Amino acid sequence: MNTVSIMFVGVGGQGTLLASRIVGNVLLNKGFDAKVSEVHGMSQRGGSVTTYVKYGDKVYSPIVDKGEADYIVAFELMEAARWVEYLKKGGKMLINTQQLSPMPVITGAAEYNSDVIDKIKALGIDVISLNALELAEQAGNDKSVNVVMMGVLSNELGFDKSLWTDALRECSPKAALESNEKAFELGVNV
């Protein structure tokens, strides 16, 4: 099997690392050689954060270079735009439409570019976009945006649902497990 590369992009506090752990857990339990990167970027609230997951028969490094990602899962709209050049031709982007203003926007030095999805689609990229924050809130925890997006990703990867629920139980903080399970279901049903 060819190696499959997934990038998770967001800002600090959105659970990028938890998402990559959940997917890594699913892949290992499915029997793949899988590599998961550590957090790249500002892991504090508000800074850009990226994690990588690669899987296949044999994987030597989790790092994804420009033009290599089969999937980019963006937890924030502007982060989707920031990392689009890492998507390979024929790849797919899963984008949460939530907008978290970076410091230049907060200070008034720049404006938030809200037509990001239209611009990405104009590049010929296949996009699934959704308001994952709204779904996370329906699940009872606005911090479950990442898990909503895992539900969407699970449809793309096509692995048995029990692998995902087992990974959620193993990786989720106990206090968030119930809302994460609901959030995952809402993502699956998008």
Image (tube, grey):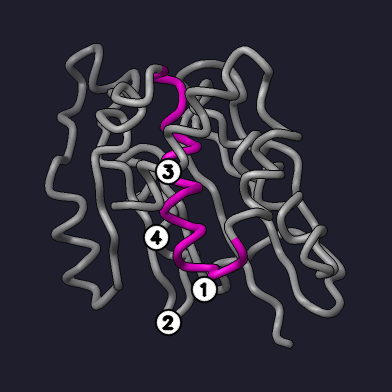
Q: Amino acid at mark 4?
A: Val
Q: In whole angstroms, how far apart are the C-alphas of marks 3 and 4?
A: 27 Å
Q: Amino acid at mark 3?
A: Glu
Q: Which residues are magenta?
A: 141-160
Is the residue 53 above or below the residue 97 in the image? below
Residue 107 in the image: state x and y as whole percent: 24, 12
Q: Which mark is residue 84?
A: 4
Does label 1 or label 4 sit earlier along the sequence? 1
The reply to whether dot 1 and dot 2 touch (C-beta < 8 Å) is yes
Which residue bears the numbered disc 3?
Answer: 185
Query: Depth-wise, is mark 3 or mark 4 nearer the camera?
Result: 3
Instruction: Please tell me which residue lies in front, 28 or 182.
Output: 182
Q: Is residue 122 magenta?
A: no
The reply to whether dot 2 and dot 3 touch (C-beta < 8 Å) is no
SS for tag 2? strand
Does label 1 or label 3 sit earlier along the sequence? 1
**Would you identify the image quadrant in which residue 89 lies?**
bottom left
Q: Amino acid at mark 2?
A: Lys
Which residue bears the numbered disc 1?
Answer: 67
Mark 2 closeness class: few <14, some 14–19, many ≥20 residues within 10 Å: some
